[in-house]
Image (cartoon, coloured by chain):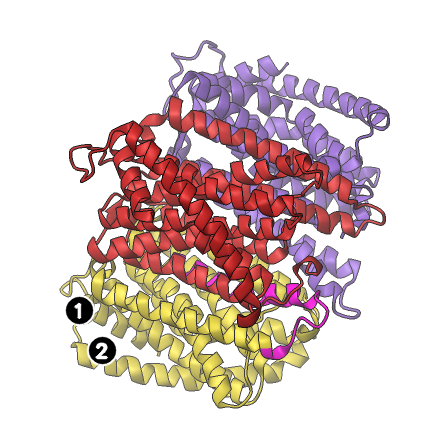
Chain colours: A red, B purple, C yellow
Amino acid sequence: MAGWIGRATEALAARVGEGLGGLLNATFGNAAELIIAGIALSKGLINVVKASITGSIIGNVLLVLGLSILMGGTKYKEQRFNRTAASTSVISLSLAAIGLIIPTVFHLAANSTPGGWSPLVEQKLSLAIAVVLFLTYFCMLGFSLWTHKHFYRGAHAHAEESAVQWSRGKAIVILLIATALVAVLSEFLVGTIENVRDSVGLTEVFVGVIVVAIVGNAAEHSTAIAVAMKNKMDLSVGIAIGSSLQIALFVAPLLIFLSYLFGRPMDLEFTMPEVVAVVASVYILFQISGDGETNWIEGVQLLSVYVILGILFFYLPEPRHVSH
Amino acid sequence: MAGWIGRATEALAARVGEGLGGLLNATFGNAAELIIAGIALSKGLINVVKASITGSIIGNVLLVLGLSILMGGTKYKEQRFNRTAASTSVISLSLAAIGLIIPTVFHLAANSTPGGWSPLVEQKLSLAIAVVLFLTYFCMLGFSLWTHKHFYRGAHAHAEESAVQWSRGKAIVILLIATALVAVLSEFLVGTIENVRDSVGLTEVFVGVIVVAIVGNAAEHSTAIAVAMKNKMDLSVGIAIGSSLQIALFVAPLLIFLSYLFGRPMDLEFTMPEVVAVVASVYILFQISGDGETNWIEGVQLLSVYVILGILFFYLPEPRHVSH
Amino acid sequence: MAGWIGRATEALAARVGEGLGGLLNATFGNAAELIIAGIALSKGLINVVKASITGSIIGNVLLVLGLSILMGGTKYKEQRFNRTAASTSVISLSLAAIGLIIPTVFHLAANSTPGGWSPLVEQKLSLAIAVVLFLTYFCMLGFSLWTHKHFYRGAHAHAEESAVQWSRGKAIVILLIATALVAVLSEFLVGTIENVRDSVGLTEVFVGVIVVAIVGNAAEHSTAIAVAMKNKMDLSVGIAIGSSLQIALFVAPLLIFLSYLFGRPMDLEFTMPEVVAVVASVYILFQISGDGETNWIEGVQLLSVYVILGILFFYLPEPRHVSH
């Protein structure tokens, strides 16, 4: 499945440019996540939804990009990508990280004021922030698809180089079908994991942030690594950063809006370890993406941060809703 | 008034270079703020003074610069400014942000030590930090006016291009008069706002951080935007960053020193939301200013962060002095 | 002594390249620190060990590099160094800083869960993180000594330019002897300081973070400044960043491993002021090292942050083990 997604993405990228190809791949990949999170939300599993948002962001930024850079780095001494395009996405990701910190800051500050905190105010605050992030996402789309699309074309968008010669329509249909199958499989796998969880002794947070994220981002993983090894770093970086950006600016706000439809309003307040994980990931991504070049040690650095965060969530005791 | 300030600043910039023109504009603009804060200080309104310091920093970095970049970006696809000059100022702003965090860190750490915290020690700590920031400001002046002034000359300092052909003396006199009038008006407006506040139901923090900052930085706003639309980004960035730098490294320490004259020593301890707001602003500024280029989406990103912080301060309950 | 270390380092750098020379100097300089910390560890003085780790990192990043840049800047208007090599080290330092934050985050999060925190879990978490940092250090060595050693050769590695014409063997022997003497002297000085401490009224934290770090890094100080004034910034930056990197990724994990041998397991949990100090230092270093150029104001900026952190640790009340 993942192989098909990869080939369809590459074929598409060859026609619309690597940056856009990355966006499309991210969109299909995140459709699976949105469906899973939507189901969890309808069941009132708000903490699982938040953990999967955190996990998707750090998983894409650290694990997907880290593996891509490392694997690409084993074949090429240095790899290049469009610094300006990546930088714009990273800044948006930083802005999203700030948006996700604020409800936690609000909670801590309001909590120490007698009678200052109420779930209702926190929901209003979160809703307002979600609207800002949502609008910023559409500005980003306008920027990358319209006013500054030349940044996102990538350096190697030559259809003739691509092994796969699919038409745009065929590539999109294959992407759609493969993504639907991945979504079904993901749902199935998540269910399986939940059952195995108790016997292995993993906490709910660890499963949400690490395990679900790895399974749920299977499409991004395989494609991003495959294209990195073909030295198409613009596409690889576009998938990894684009996917986490879409989670933060589009999927997370959308889930907030959906939660109102389900009659169980969700806020954007994350636990302190989740906030630290997102901020650390975005910060290290900013440093790595600053020069438009990658080498294997940068992959190792991203993966090291991922493992360190994984260790944190592994040892973190349940229940998470008491931890703030 | 603002129009005069803008024209005088431009005329001056044409003669002394855009970077220096920015510094002068910032100085006149902040004179108004210093007067307002000084009056508040003499009345013992320490929280209002601190809120206005926070508000000025984030207002200049996010709102003034954000609007300038956005408006400039509607006319020009890409705009450029001197990366090195901006970077030096941004690093100083980061250093100031660290200086403003430390008293809060001290408070939290000392507070958990039995008998470890006292207002007197906190005042000494704040005074010592204020001295360091103050000395750094004069080093920055020496750097930008003397040893490395070529960084600050700007790319477009051609007197003949400027619409206004005022002499240096005339420009300075006009700046002085207009600034004095802005100060009087600001004071008047602030008074009015305070009266309207209760009927609208705004908190003191929101008024201090957001409303007063917008009104008090009217001069920077109008000028920075006007010159950005004339593609003079060195001047625009110089005004916005220079102004917040001056507030952090010069005005804030000066207010600490003044508070001792008034016999009501002020410390530099800010509330946690204020600290987060300043750190987030400086961090996003650092990312935006890193490449020496701007486009409209960067303006949107700065403004998004401003709106998110505005939402935080809007919902934050009173009273702020209990919140830490 | 320090003079000899400097000359031996320069002679070596002339033969193996400036970046490697920096690594070797850092290794010999940190040998002294490892010995001092090991002795403190065997006596169970865990807080002193942690304070000296913090102090070494911020001392090298802020004081050693700050003085080098400032002194070099008094002779040269602009100085250059290899941006890519420095950037890789700074990212590793950021990753180390994240590693050092996590145990504190864990402590805070787990502490608020009833029965969620135990010293044993915290030791396991710290041990796991130490292993990750340790492995990353060896990846960094492989990167700088093997796959990408061309980054670390430095621009001015000409043996004929060097005043000292020692063979590689002679230079290493002199480095070894001089380092051993510095270690003995350091131990002696630290003992003396401890005795003087009470009469002057300094806290244990201040001595550990500031005083011991200055004395223990004497070798790095003198050499880094001396070579900066000879415009060998690659070597100077290599020593300062390399030394703090080695402390964070190699010495700190090694001390954790040693603590198990001594039967008194140490964790990696630092106090909140220590965490803030390390994060602030690495952040400001990242900003300063971003453009591959230095000038005197950047030295002033690093030193200002150092003085501000020094003020914090000076006023911080004892006892430190209650402060979290």
- Say if the magenta span includes residue C143: no
Where is residue C284? Give x, y as percent: 48, 52
Q: Element at badge 2?
A: helix
Q: How many marks?
A: 2
Left or right of residue C112: residue B170: left
Specify whether residue B80 is in view: no
Report the amino acid beneath label 1.
Arg
Q: Main secondary structure of the magenta part?
A: helix
Which residue matches tag 2?
A: C171
Please name whichever residue, B232 or A287, is drawn nearer the observer in this view of the structure. Answer: A287
Report the amino acid beneath label 2.
Ala
Residue B195 position (above or below residue C173):
above
The span picked out in magenta is C91-120
Q: Residues within 10 Å of mark 2 (few under 14, many from 20)?
A: many
Residue C149 position (above or below residue B199):
below
Where is residue B186? Give x, y as percent: 73, 23
Residue B160 falls in image quadrant: top left
Left or right of residue A231: residue C130: right
| Protein chain holding label 1 | C
Which residue matches tag 1?
A: C15
Residue at figure coordinates x 76%, y 37% from the top left: B205
